[in-house]
Image (cartoon, rainbow, N blue to C red):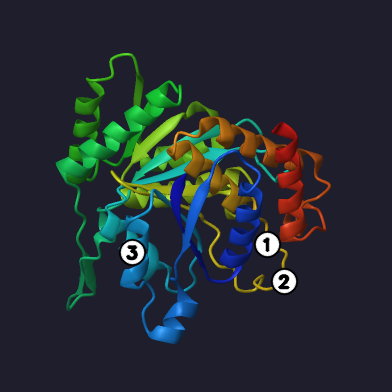
Amino acid sequence: MYKIAVIPGDGIGKEVMEATLHVLEAIDVVFDYTFADAGDEYMEKTGVALPRETVDIVKASQACLFGAAGESAADVIVKMRQELDLYVNLRPVKSYPGTKCIFDNLDFVIVRENTEGLYIGLEEETEEGATATRVVTRKASERICKFAFEYTKKTGRKKVTAVHKANVLKKTDGLFKETFYKVAEDYPDMELDDRYVDATAMFFITKPEMFDVIVTTNLFGDILSDEGAGLVGGLGLIPSANIGENQGLFEPVHGSAPRLAGKGVANPSAMILSAVMMLDYLDENNAARKLENALVEVLAEGKVVTGDLGGSSSTMEMAAEVRSKLEEYN
């Protein structure tokens, strides 16, 4: 039995979470859920977006499923990353049938350093305007590169590409590039590559199939992840993982979508795929493949899907169809 923290959050987060938990009832893995609060609605009631109790619940769990946060997302997710040292942001870019993919043959992963760079928030106003400090450390670069190589090895992938701008940012990205090749010495059988971030953005459009696993710094990873999402149907279909040494937090990247909230029409795919990532994180790989395959079957048939996928089904109707397919596998 796995102890799982569940944070539905705001807006459609609650609806896709309910749908995903309904689907997870059909897999051969037992979960012990502890529900916790975070987000805009909780902040309106208490003045706090992320209560200490929620952080403690996540710390005491083996993984966390997170629905969505609204305007308080930075206060919730960024603080959670810092509190739990979730130094990896993992974003798959994968084509699925029945979706509005620009490319139908993509399957690569972006490994983003999650704790430093420009996102540490060291900004200040000056007489001329404002400045921001970018921090890239050897320790953080080493551990994110090592994670990328270990992930590549574990998942049977072949190639790791470091993305940087070391030709301009000679000190910070120079350190990141140097560290990448130093860590790579421990993985002599791995195919290596490094690309400038601007060239990578171009290759995402012209030749995205060249990528397998990308490892990069915080800001570059954030931008490239959303560009990757655009290649395979948009943010509504994209899961993510925030991973540290002791915890993993799994969430869709579509946000709380307040205009859709309460209508029962939100696409649950990204939340379901986030649960797939959680199962892989827990080494329940067989269950993960069954769940992913059940969703793929529903997407490919295109009969019981939400409006954004060309159907007319509700969130829970689509989830029920995925669960039905899943039960056929058991």
Nearer the observer, 298 or 115: 298
Tell me how far mark 3 sits from mark 1, CA to CA.
Answer: 27 Å
Q: Tell me: residue 108, above or below residue 302.
A: above
Residue 318 percent across, percent down from the top left: 75, 53
Amino acid of disc 3: Val
- What residue is disc 2 on? 263
- Contact between marks 2 and 1 (CB within 8 A): the answer is yes
Nearer the observer, 39 or 228: 39
Residue 105 percent across, percent down from the top left: 63, 30
Amino acid of disc 2: Lys
Q: In the shown orientation, is residue 287 left or right of residue 147? A: right
Asked if one can make out residue 94 in the rendered structure from this viewpoint, the answer is: yes
Asked if one can make out residue 78 in the rendered structure from this viewpoint, the answer is: no
Discs 2/3, front = 3
Q: Which one is earlier in the sequence, the residue at label 3 or at label 1?
A: 3
Q: Residues within 10 Å of mark 1 (few under 14, many from 20)?
A: many
- What residue is disc 1 on? 266
Nearer the observer, 289 or 219: 289
Nearer the observer, 288 or 90: 288
Residue 114 percent across, percent down from the top left: 32, 50
Q: In the shown orientation, is residue 28 left or right of residue 98? A: left
Tell me the SS state at disc 2.
loop
| Residue at position x 38%, y 62% in the image | 77
Q: Residues within 10 Å of mark 3 (few under 14, many from 20)?
A: some
Q: Which quadrant of the structure image shows residue 174? A: top left
- What residue is disc 3 on? 55
